[in-house]
Structure formats: C-alpha cells, structure tokens
Image (tube, rainbow, N blue to C red):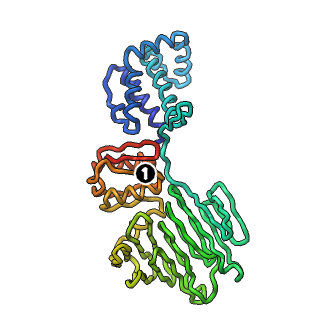
Amino acid sequence: MTIYDRIFALANKLAKALSNGEETDALKEADYLSQETKTRIQESLSKPALEEQLGKLKEIDVENDWAKVVERLQKPTRSLMPKLYKAAAIALLLFSLSYLTYNHIQKSEQGVSVQVAIEPGTDKALLILEDGTQVALSPETTFKNKVAQSKEDRLEYNYVNAPLYTAVNYLVVPRGGQYQLKLADGTEIWLNADTKIKYPIAFQPGETRTVELLYGEAYLMVSPSSKHQGDAFKIIAKGQEVNVIGTIFNLKAYNDEEKIYTTLVEGKVHIAAKDKSVELHPGEQSVWDHSTNQLSKSSVDVNHHTAWIRGYFYFEDKPLKEIMQVLSRWYDVHISFDSPELQNVKFSGLLSKEQTIEEILNGIKNTNSISAYEIKNKSITIK
C-alpha cells in the first residue's frame, strides 16, 4: 500500500467514525505520520473546525453535487448521510491532498526541506572508462562503444583484440543502487549497493584472469578455465585473494566492516590472506578479519548470504547494527541509534528489497525489536 492509499484510507476511517459519533484509534495507529501532522489533523476534526468548514461549504450546492456522486456510485443510501459527515469527508479529502503536497514538495519559500518518501534502490551504476570518461548507466540510458554495451540493468563486454589487454575500466554502484556486469571472458557479476570493481577490458591468454573488488559486495559466476585454455581466475579484495578455477561464490568486503566474507555456492576456491590460507567447498564460508589477521571457515546456508541477488534481505539472529548497515546502503540513508544497547538487539526475518524503508522498519518494530523510529529527511533514528 502506497502513502497515497494509506492517507485516503485514514480519511475514510475517520469520516465514518465522526458520522457515527464513535471513537477510533486510526489516527494514533498511523505510524507513517509525524506527531505534528497528527496534531494538525486532530485540530481540523474538532467540532468548531468542522462547523467552520460547514460555513465555507454553504456557497456550494453540497446536496446536488453529493447526489450526483451517489448516483454515479449507485449507492442511494449515502444521500441520507448527515451534513457533518459530508463536511468531514470533504475536509479530510482536502487534508489528504494538502498532506501529500506538504510532505512531497520542497518548501523553497521557507528554505526548509520537508520529508519525502524514501524509496528502495534501483538499477544504476557509474562506468569509468580507460580515458577517465564517466558514463551514468541505468535502464533509461543506452551506452555502447567498441567493446561494451549496456542492456537495461547490466553492462556486457565483448571479446576484443590484444591491443586492449592492458586497458582497465571501473564500475561503481552507488548507495541506493545495484547493477550487473558481464566480463569479456563471459564471467557474470552481480554488484550490490555501495560497490566498486576494477577489471580489464579483455584478458591476456596464458595469464590469470584478474579483477579487483575495491569495496562492496559481488556475486560471481566465473567462466570456467576449460573455456580459456586453463587460465585461472582471481579476484582481489583488500589484500585477500580468491583463486578460482570455475565456480559461483559471493564476496563481501565493505569499507565500514572489518571482516571479508567469501561464501561458496558451487565449485572450489582457495583463499589467501597475508600468511593465512584456506580452501572452500560448496556450502562453506570463510571470514577474514583484516584487523587481526584471523582467517576461519564454517558451514553456512548459502541461500541466506545470496538472498540479495534475488531481491530479498535475509537476517538470521543478526544484531540491529549490522542490519541497519545493510538497509542504509540500499535506501541511501544514515541510520543512528537512540541508545548504544539497541545496536546489539538481535532480529531474524526475510524482507523484500521492494518494500519502502517505512515498511521494513515497521516489520522490525512489530516484533518488538525496537519501540519506535524517527525519519528526518535522509536520516533515521532507531528508538
């Protein structure tokens, strides 16, 4: 349900309650509204305010206009509704429109930014070519040169000749974004929000195919060595090397996290980090803490760690601090905590990346993991 649906549904509930002289908690339960907004609504629904509204409506032929509406709706019983109900319904409808305008438009004359809806991330990236040229990529834009072309949510490279073996490109996925990449050797890569990868336009035959994850998270389906005269594949991430023959795995190495996670889905990889090394088999994950130089591995459910490429967040007994790091990247917001203790509260759940940030936070709140949250512009405070 969009914010528009919620506002009009609220108007309907409040108007019905007014007409029947009943009390309702609909306004109190509308956690998508600020307290200031709720106060304004309550004031507009007081008896004096409604009587004033009735006075303003005297110049309008309410009965005639309402009859036309009733006739179109083929609900003749509505014509018996009290004038106060009609006035309240009209007032609430006008409020709904003013609320949407007030909350989704910049009040430039006051120099103040008002709250706008925080939408989920989208398919977008910035391509940096070998000459430094920057190209914004999205489903709405088209890019093509001699070696690559964009196709909606992905960038694909073609096989090219030797003169371009030394040329390097970068693909940067910003916060609030995701994108796909197909390298010249056929390797496919899914890039999560806040990620930057460095790769050659083409690979030199007889040498290891090498790319570098400068930061962020990537899911790779590596083209097997058998298709490239036995040439191995290697991806470097902050000093850790993942040596691959042909496999599918997830690599997570964010700047704001001390650990690098490598999760193997298919095949076999060899992890090397400084003087440490480990070999992974399907269903295993390695964790390298580059601050302590500790490298370990364990068995995991790979579906949990790769849910993001299928459009989901999967959290299993994760502290809110880690969860909010993930959400802040996808929704491109800053999230803080009202108290340090909240950061360690654990939460488990499967959530859709298509949901708004409010829906995600309400879902967490409904489990009593948090008591409340506050959104101001692009900043969120967990309470």
Task: Please tell me how many numbered marks the rendered image carries.
Answer: 1
- Secondary structure, mark 1, is strand
Quadrant in the picture for residue 239: bottom left
Quadrant in the picture for residue 7: top left
The picture places residue 188, in percent across and down from the top left corner, at 56, 72
At horizontal 62% and vertical 76% (from top left) the residue drawn is 200
Residue 267 higher or lower than 147, as above or below: below
The picture places residue 4, in percent across and down from the top left corner, at 49, 36
In the orientation shown, which residue stands out farthest toward the left? 341
Q: Out of 188 and 65, give the one closest to the viewer.
A: 188
Determine which residue is flagged by label 1: 334
In the orientation shown, which residue stands out farthest toward the right? 146
The picture places residue 341, in percent across and down from the top left corner, at 26, 53
The picture places residue 124, in percent across and down from the top left corner, at 58, 58
Q: Quick check: can you spot residue 377? A: yes
At label 1, the amino acid type is: His
Within-10-Å neighbours for mark 1: few <14, some 14–19, many 20+: some
Residue 211 higher or lower than 111, as above or below: below
Quadrant in the picture for residue 313: bottom left
Q: Out of 291 and 303, give the one closest to the viewer.
A: 291
Residue 227 higher or lower than 142, as above or below: below
At horizontal 52% and vertical 13% (from top left) the residue drawn is 63
Q: Quick check: can you spot residue 365? A: no
Q: Out of 304 and 289, give the one closest to the viewer.
A: 289
At horizontal 42% and vertical 13% (from top left) the residue drawn is 51
292 on left or right of 187: left
